[in-house]
Image: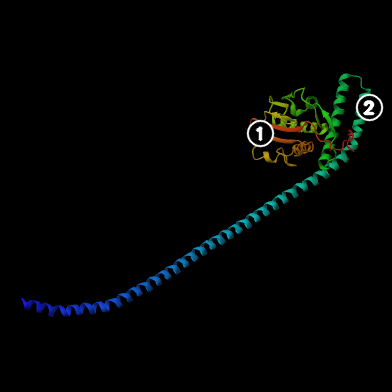
């Protein structure tokens, strides 16, 4: 029994010594390893912060570049738009310049025609009035009266042409629209353009009177009726109607026909001076003068047309105008 105990004591002595030696070296190694791990962790953390900061700066730089790029694009678009607007204004200016040149030509033609025709027209009118005084036959007197009326219409047309080229003050008067349409249709009754066509006055007699330049409105109606007659085939119908607009102190006048209509590509140009669809027959001034007269009387004019079905010209005029126009007496002959 004594031998095994001594054996164990001899063998155990070196084992305890080895464990102590290992423990003496393991502690510093562990401490060093821990310090190294802490240093590595801190270095990794610093590197991670640096990477994150660099990534943040890169993101901010990209966003700033995108903003600058968008601003540069907007500037390019703005400059392109400004260039486009300048080109548009240049085109409009050139178009207005062309219109002014037309008006200048029209003014010269109107003044020349007025002075050239006025003196012979005075002589014709004086002769007709003398003939009327000496005429006793009713039919003959009627024919002379029609000639006098036609001479005065020529004078009014010339005066209108001069006023179009060199506008003067309006001569306003309270006007019965029904009577004006009746007189205008009566004057045009014997005109070749209206032969074979029906022209009806559908203007109510109790329509309120309007304050307007009667000569100018009469000229507008004549121009519209003649245009309608020339566009309407035999057997067609031409009507003049009017009504008071609801909630507005204005009158709406419509001149309608059952004619050939106006092509859509031509419709926007019908009010332009010298524009005509009847080369060799028309001057292209009728609708232009009519639009000018309507606007001078504070009104509006528009045209609606359908091919092969007809055309309607709508005029809107105020019942009362502001008394801002100088009223003067109208002479029968242009001076």
Placement of 315 over or under 135, stated as above or below: below
Estimate the x, y position of residue 10 in percent, counting from the top left. Answer: 12, 80
Q: Which mark is residue 130?
A: 2
**What secondary structure is found at the residue carrying circle 1?**
strand
Say whether residue 176 is left or right of residue 22. right
> Closer to the camera, 265 or 57?
57
Q: Which mark is residue 305?
A: 1
The structure residue drawn at horizontal position 77% and vertical position 46%, both measured from the top left corner, is: 102
The structure residue drawn at horizontal position 91% and vertical position 34%, both measured from the top left corner, is: 122
Estimate the x, y position of residue 292 in percent, counting from the top left. Answer: 77, 39
For the C terminus, give its image quadrant: top right
Foreground disc of the pair 1, 2:
1
> Closer to the camera, 287 or 108?
287
Estimate the x, y position of residue 113 in percent, counting from the top left. Answer: 85, 40
For the N terminus, give its image quadrant: bottom left
Quadrant assignment, res 242: top right
Placement of 34 over or under 201, stated as above or below: below
> Closer to the camera, 125 or 334?
334
Say whether residue 77 is left or right of residue 240. left
Quadrant assignment, res 211: top right
The structure residue drawn at horizontal position 65% and vertical position 55%, both measured from the top left corner, is: 82
Say whether residue 123 is left or right of residue 25. right
Q: Quick one: label 1 or label 2, which is nearer the N terminus?
A: 2
């Amino acid at each position: 029994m004594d031998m095994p105990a001594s054996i164990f004591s001899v063998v155990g002595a070196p084992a305890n010594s080895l464990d102590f030696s290992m423990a003496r070296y393991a502690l510093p190694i562990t401490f060093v390893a821990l310090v190294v791990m802490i240093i590595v962790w801190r270095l990794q953390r610093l590197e991670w912060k640096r990477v994150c900061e660099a990534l943040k700066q890169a993101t901010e730089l990209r966003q700033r570049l995108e903003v600058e790029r968008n601003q540069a694009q907007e500037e390019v678009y703005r400059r392109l738009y400004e260039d486009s607007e300048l080109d548009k204004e240049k085109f409009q200016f050139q178009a207005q310049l062309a219109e002014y040149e037309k008006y200048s030509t029209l003014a010269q033609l109107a003044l020349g025609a007025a002075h050239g025709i006025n003196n012979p027209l005075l002589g014709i009118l004086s002769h007709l009035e003398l003939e009327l005084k000496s005429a006793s036959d009713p039919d003959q007197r009627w024919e002379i009266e029609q000639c006098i009326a036609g001479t005065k219409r020529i004078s009014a047309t010339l005066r209108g042409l001069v006023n179009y080229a060199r506008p003067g003050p309006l001569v306003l008067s309270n006007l019965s629209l029904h009577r004006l349409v009746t007189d205008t249709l009566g004057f045009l009754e014997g005109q070749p353009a209206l032969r074979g066509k029906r022209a009806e006055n559908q203007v109510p007699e109790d329509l309120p009177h309007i304050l307007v330049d009667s000569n100018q409105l009469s000229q507008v109606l004549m121009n519209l009726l003649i245009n309608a007659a020339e566009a309407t085939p035999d057997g067609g119908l031409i009507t003049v109607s009017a009504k008071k607009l609801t909630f507005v102190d204005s009158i709406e006048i419509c001149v309608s026909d059952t004619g050939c209509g106006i092509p859509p590509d031509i419709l926007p140009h019908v009010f332009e001076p010298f524009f005509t669809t009847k080369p060799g027959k028309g001057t292209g001034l009728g609708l232009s003068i009519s639009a000018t007269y309507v606007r001078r009387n504070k009104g509006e004019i528009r045209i609606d047309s359908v091919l092969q079905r007809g055309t309607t010209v709508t005029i809107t005029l105020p019942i009362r105008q502001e008394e801002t126009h100088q009223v003067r007496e109208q002479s029968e002959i242009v001076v």
